[in-house]
Structures are given as structure tokens and as C-alpha cells.
Image: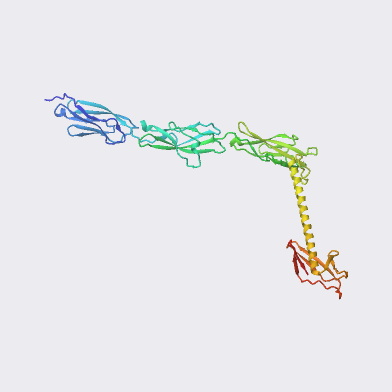
């Protein structure tokens, strides 16, 4: 009779480790079992732990196959300890254990993940080039080369943003170094995207948004808009002597290119011809009278107003004001004594030009009149055939016989009409003043409405 005196034996024919993750029904091991006993003592049961993702399949001849039940995830568990238990059915039962360690190999199945979805970095303007302004970081759950991450900048969405000249990134560690000095007044903020890619095959990547905010530095002094301080003629403000205390004289207007408290401006009176007469409101730059004016106060005053920002350190500018006290606004403006010689020379030259132009115009007009008179005299001689028209008084004339008899002829009155708007003139013979005397020279025969046109364009009409 057989006695159960032999434990089952396990013979391993194939074993694979590590096995790739994400590979279902992958064969891990092939083995066979045997027992030298007979009957119930030689019958064998074979099994593994129930909490493992593996299957144990039997085949003909007590051969068994160990394979994966489902895809494995190396990032969750990188190795498994598998115990194959073989027992017979004898009394008492004898058992054999075979332990094996199954390693899981990595597959590039994880995308690099940034520690943040977006990053906000701050850099103060006027920074030094190559300044480290911040970093981005991404990790990969894979292993080996599948977990090695490299960083790169993506082209900006704004095609006008010169990103390549503003920032750069270290491909190995994600450090971001500004390439040049930034100016808050030119660029307050900009954003771009960073890509993190692993070295797997195929490579997997992800992106993150980076926003860079430029912080303002107090690098701009206040600029005075009014009154202008460009070296031109100063603007003088008129103040009536009857003005009450608090009378608004003028207002100094200034701006600052910075922002925040670096652009907050305050005003104060730095210098004055007569202290205590004027004051400046600190918050808005209004210049007002501080007391009643009197006849003893000087007529002209010069004020210097200091404009200062609230930056650290503060920056400032000055504005110069000229104030003239008058008895009333109807009083003509009195020019300041500091008129430049160039201005006086310009005014004298203007007067000379006006006088010269008037003289030339007068001479031209006189020449035209003389020319017209000469032409009229010549026409009259030709028409009267030997008689000359001698004017007497304003416009009368006598026909004088040039033959020597000196017999007076009829008396004619004529007029010259010059039309300034049409550029024409008319010469008219009116009816004789004395009745026609028989035997005397007849009237000069001329066609009515005959016209003579001189060389200057005047139209002369004889009637």
C-alpha cells in the first residue's frame, strides 16, 4: 500500500521578467508539476494568490501557464511577488511552494505634467539682462528616458510680440532668464506658452501658460503740460487787484509716465517774488491768492512751482509762472521788459515792409493816372483835327484854333469814369454849354459810343 511520502515537485521551463506594462495576457512563466506517489497521494492541485493580476491555466500533462490577466500599470506597481502553491490530495497533504518576482517594464504612456496650469512671474523694469525671473516645472511618471523632460518656448499668439528677444528658457530645468532690460512704459505685461516634452518614443508633451508682469520703477520725472516750459515766451496770468483771497490765478498741469504711487503728484510753491501773496494747492496744482491785494504790492510777480511724485526716491520738476496785477481786465496788457532783441528787430522789419509796399502802390497808381491822361490828350488832338482840348476847372474845356485866329469855339464839358470793379473807364462829351454859333468851328465829329482802349486795359468811351 502507497504512503504519501513524496511532496509535489515543480519544474520551471520558461520565465519572463520584466514584462511590459499595458500588455494583457502576456506569458510570464511555463512550468510542470509532478508527484511520485500514486492514487490520491499523487493527485495535485496548483494555484496562486487571489489578489494578483495573473491567471494560471493548466494544460495536458500537468503543464501550467502563468500569464497576465489585464494590462499592468508600472506607475501603480512596478513588481509583483508571485507564489505558486502545489499540493497533493494525500493524507496528510504535502505542499510545495515556488516563489518568483515579476518586474514590470515601463512604457511611455504618461504625458509630462506641469506643477501648475499657469504661471505668473514678476520682473521689475530696468532689470539687468540675463536675470532669472522664474521657473516652470513638469514631471513624468514614467521611468528612464520616458521620464526625462525638456522645455521649449512656443511661438506667441501675438505676431507682433518679439518673444525671442524678451525671454529664453533652459531646456533642462525650465528656468526663465529676461534677455534685455524691460521698460514698463513700453510693455506692461506679456504672455506665452511653454512646452514640456519627454524623450520617449513617440514623445509625449504638454503645455502651460506663462504670464510675465513688469513692475513699474520710478524712472520718469513729472512733465509739466501747462504752462509750457520749453523756453518760449512765458505766458503771463492777469490778476485784478480787487480779487478776493482764494482767487484762482491759474493751474499747473503735469503728468507722470509711471504708474501707482510713482505717478501721484503733489505741488508746492518753491519761490515767489513776494512770499505770502500766492499759494499752491498740493493735490491739484491750483495757484490762488492767499490774501487781499493792495496798491503796495508789486505789479509783476514770478512764481516757481515744484511738482514732485511719490516714488522712492521721488522725482521732481519745476514750473515758472509770471503774474501781472492789473486794476481791471480792461487795462491793456503791459509787456514784460525782458523782450528779446530779435523780437524788436522783427517788428521793425515788419513796419519797413508795410511802408515800402504802400509807397510802391502809390507810385504805381500815380503812373497809371498820368499814362491815361497822356493817352486822352493824344486821342483828343487826333479827333479835333488841329484843335487841342485844354482842360479848365474840374472837367470843362475849350477848343482853340491852332491856325492862329484864336477864335473860341464851343465849350464842352466832359468827364472820365473809371469803374474799379470792371477795369474800364468812359470818356464822355456832354452837350455844349453855349449855343452853337454860326460860322464857328463845328462840333468835333465823333461817333457815339466810340471806345478807345489804352495799353493798360482801360476802356475810354467818347459820347
Q: Is residue 130 above or below residue 361?
A: above
Residue 402 vs residue 367, the one in the foreground: 402
Residue 326 figure quarter = top right
Locate the N terminus by quadrant. top left
Q: Is residue 3 left or right of residue 377?
A: left
- Residue sticking out furthest to the front: 403
Q: Can residue 432 be seen at all in this image of the molecule?
A: yes
Q: Is residue 406 left or right of residue 258?
A: right
Q: Is residue 235 left or right of residue 261?
A: right
Residue 121 vs residue 203, the one in the foreground: 203
Residue 110 figure quarter = top left
Residue 450 figure quarter = bottom right
Residue 238 vs residue 432, the one in the foreground: 432
Q: Can residue 292 be seen at all in this image of the molecule?
A: no
Where residue 315 appears, as percent x and y from the top left, is: 63, 33
Where residue 412 appears, as percent x and y from the top left, is: 83, 69
Q: Is residue 267 above or below residue 434?
A: above
Amino acid at each position: 500500500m502507497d504512503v504519501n511520502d513524496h511532496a509535489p515537485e515543480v519544474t520551471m521551463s520558461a520565465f519572463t521578467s520584466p514584462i511590459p506594462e499595458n500588455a494583457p495576457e502576456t506569458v510570464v512563466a511555463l512550468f510542470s508539476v509532478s508527484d511520485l506517489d500514486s492514487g490520491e497521494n499523487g493527485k495535485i492541485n496548483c494555484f496562486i494568490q487571489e489578489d494578483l493580476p495573473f491567471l494560471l491555466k493548466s494544460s495536458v500533462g500537468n503543464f501550467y501557464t502563468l500569464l497576465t490577466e489585464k494590462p499592468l500599470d508600472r506607475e501603480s506597481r512596478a513588481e509583483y511577488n508571485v507564489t505558486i502553491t502545489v499540493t497533493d490530495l494525500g493524507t496528510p497533504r504535502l505542499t510545495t511552494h515556488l516563489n518568483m518576482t515579476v518586474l514590470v517594464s515601463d512604457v511611455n504612456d504618461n504625458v509630462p505634467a506641469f506643477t501648475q496650469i499657469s504661471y505668473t512671474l514678476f520682473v521689475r523694469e530696468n532689470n539687468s539682462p540675463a536675470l532669472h525671473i522664474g521657473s516652470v516645472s513638469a514631471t513624468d511618471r514614467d521611468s528612464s528616458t520616458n521620464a526625462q523632460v525638456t522645455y521649449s518656448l512656443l511661438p506667441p499668439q501675438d505676431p507682433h510680440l518679439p518673444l525671442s528677444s524678451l525671454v529664453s528658457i533652459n531646456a533642462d530645468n525650465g528656468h526663465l532668464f529676461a534677455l534685455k532690460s524691460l521698460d514698463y512704459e513700453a510693455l506692461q505685461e506679456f504672455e506665452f506658452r511653454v512646452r514640456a516634452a519627454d524623450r520617449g518614443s513617440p514623445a509625449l508633451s504638454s503645455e502651460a501658460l506663462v504670464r510675465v508682469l513688469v513692475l513699474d520703477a520710478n524712472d520718469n520725472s513729472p512733465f509739466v503740460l501747462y504752462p509750457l516750459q520749453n523756453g518760449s515766451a512765458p505766458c503771463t496770468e492777469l490778476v485784478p487787484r480787487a480779487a478776493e483771497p482764494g482767487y484762482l490765478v491759474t493751474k499747473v498741469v503735469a503728468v507722470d509716465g509711471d504708474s501707482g504711487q510713482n505717478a501721484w503728484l503733489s505741488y508746492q510753491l518753491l519761490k515767489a517774488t513776494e512770499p505770502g501773496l500766492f499759494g499752491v494747492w498740493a493735490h491739484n496744482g491750483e495757484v490762488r491768492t492767499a490774501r487781499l491785494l493792495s496798491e503796495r504790492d508789486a505789479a509783476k510777480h514770478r512764481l516757481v512751482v515744484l511738482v514732485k511724485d511719490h516714488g522712492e526716491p521721488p522725482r521732481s520738476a519745476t514750473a515758472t509762472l509770471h503774474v501781472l496785477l492789473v486794476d481791471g481786465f480792461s487795462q491793456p496788457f503791459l509787456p514784460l521788459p525782458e523782450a528779446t532783441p530779435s523780437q524788436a528787430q522783427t517788428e521793425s522789419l515788419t513796419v519797413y515792409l508795410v511802408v515800402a509796399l504802400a509807397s510802391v502802390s502809390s507810385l504805381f497808381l500815380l503812373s497809371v493816372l498820368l499814362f491815361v491822361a497822356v493817352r486822352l490828350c493824344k486821342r483828343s488832338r487826333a479827333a479835333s483835327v488841329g484843335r487841342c482840348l485844354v482842360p479848365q476847372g474840374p472837367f470843362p474845356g475849350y477848343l482853340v484854333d491852332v491856325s492862329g485866329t484864336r477864335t473860341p469855339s464851343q465849350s464842352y464839358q466832359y468827364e472820365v469814369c473809371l469803374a474799379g470793379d470792371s477795369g474800364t473807364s468812359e470818356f464822355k462829351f456832354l452837350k455844349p454849354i453855349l449855343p452853337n454859333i454860326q460860322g464857328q468851328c463845328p462840333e468835333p465829329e465823333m461817333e457815339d459810343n466810340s471806345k478807345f482802349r489804352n495799353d493798360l486795359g482801360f476802356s475810354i468811351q467818347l459820347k
